[in-house]
Amino acid sequence: VSVEQLARVEALVQEVIAAKVPVSVRETSLADAKSIAGLRAVPGEAYPDPVRVVTVGAGTIDELLAAPGEAKWKMQSVEFCGGTHIKDSSEAGAFVILEEKAIAKGIRRIIGATGPAAAEALAEGGRLAGVLAALEVAKEASEAEVLELSKALDAADISAVLKADCRDRLDTLRKKLKKSQKGADKAVLTEANASLKKAAQDAVRKGDKHMVLLLVDVDPKVLMQVIGGAPKDMAALILSPADDGTVHCVAAVPAELSGDGKGADGWVRAALAPLGGTGGGKPERAQGSAKGAAADIAAAEAAASAYFASARA
């Protein structure tokens, strides 16, 4: 069943609820009931005699039984049912389709709700749709916010029609964020490369063969790209404190500078040790991190500078 068809079903039921269509209930003989035009019954089901008949529409059960062959009865619901029922359709209050799924080959089931359950589903659906609308117009919606909303939608008992619409809009938002992130990463990479170049020039002026660079809140993937552009004759280590407090670290050490067993891997571990972090990799290239340690970034800078200085002493 398509989303469009589900939406049409929801709309039709809401129209019936708004119309305050009367509900008529009566027990009658099975034979008389079966003679009513438009009667819905489950094939192969055994029904009692007499049987309880429920109809939703202008015609009452008495009127249906008085002229059972009238074609107009096909335009209203006439069914065998032993359950309790409302006096007219308006008592249902509201209606939403919560789920539509396959239960067997060629058989699908639609699960709906009325009354307070429908009202709650509509309210929650409206709230989630509002959150999504806010993300769509936000200048800097994050992937974390999109993921959180996606999980909330999956778990929510809301209209299946609204849920499908929200999922489509979330997919569009994800693509927009991904495109935006690529542009942002490119700009950050350009700026970071410029900082690396300047730090390398400063190190050369000082006569150093190593440099320690601080870049604030740069994604670890971007950091790996930046360190890949470090001068081939100079050891480089980059520290980057993130908004969540994590300190990321990457390092590159040319083979001719990684003497005494002190390569990039050891350098990263030494820099992060004061922060309770760790890392790993190879003597030529390594990376690591320390959680919740951004406030102590100065200690990591000092440890990084001391490590390589002692390695070359």
Image (cartoon, rainbow, N blue to C red):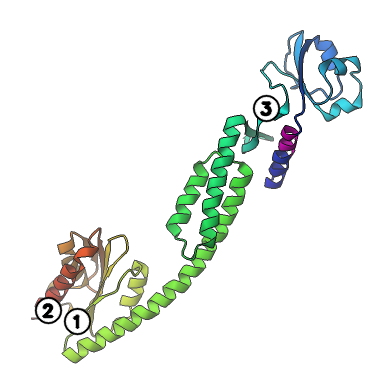
- Total count of labels: 3
Indicate the position of residue 83 as horizontal and vertical percent values. 67, 17
Which residue is rendered at x = 54% and y = 38% of the image? 157
Give the Cα distance between marks 2 and 1: 8 Å
Evaluate whether residue 31 shows in this view. yes
Pointer 2 with pointer 1, Cβ within 8 A: yes
Which secondary structure lies at badge 1? Answer: strand
Q: Left or right: where does residue 199 sit relative to residue 45? A: left
For disc 3, the marked residue is 91
For disc 1, the marked residue is 210
User: Dot 2, crowdedness within 10 Å: few (<14), some or many (≥20)?
Assistant: some
Q: Mark on residue 309?
A: 2
Q: Left or right: where does residue 95 sit relative to residue 179? A: right
* Residue 208 against residue 13 in the figure, above or below: below
Give the Cα distance between marks 3 and 1: 78 Å
Q: Nearer the viewer, residue 22 or 193?
A: 22
Indicate the position of residue 229 as horizontal and vertical percent values. 33, 80
User: Of label 2 and label 1, which has the lower sequence position?
Assistant: 1
User: Dot 1, crowdedness within 10 Å: few (<14), some or many (≥20)?
Assistant: many
Q: Nearer the viewer's eye, disc 3 or disc 1?
A: 3
Which secondary structure lies at badge 3? Answer: helix
Q: Which residues are magenta?
A: 12-18
Identity of the amino acid at label 3?
Answer: Glu
Which residue is rendered at x = 58% and y = 51% of the image? 166
Q: Nearer the viewer, residue 43 or 109?
A: 109
User: Of label 3 and label 2, which has the lower sequence position?
Assistant: 3
Indicate the position of residue 195 as horizontal and vertical percent values. 31, 82
Which residue is rendered at x = 36% and y = 74% of the image? 225
Q: Is residue 183 magenta?
A: no
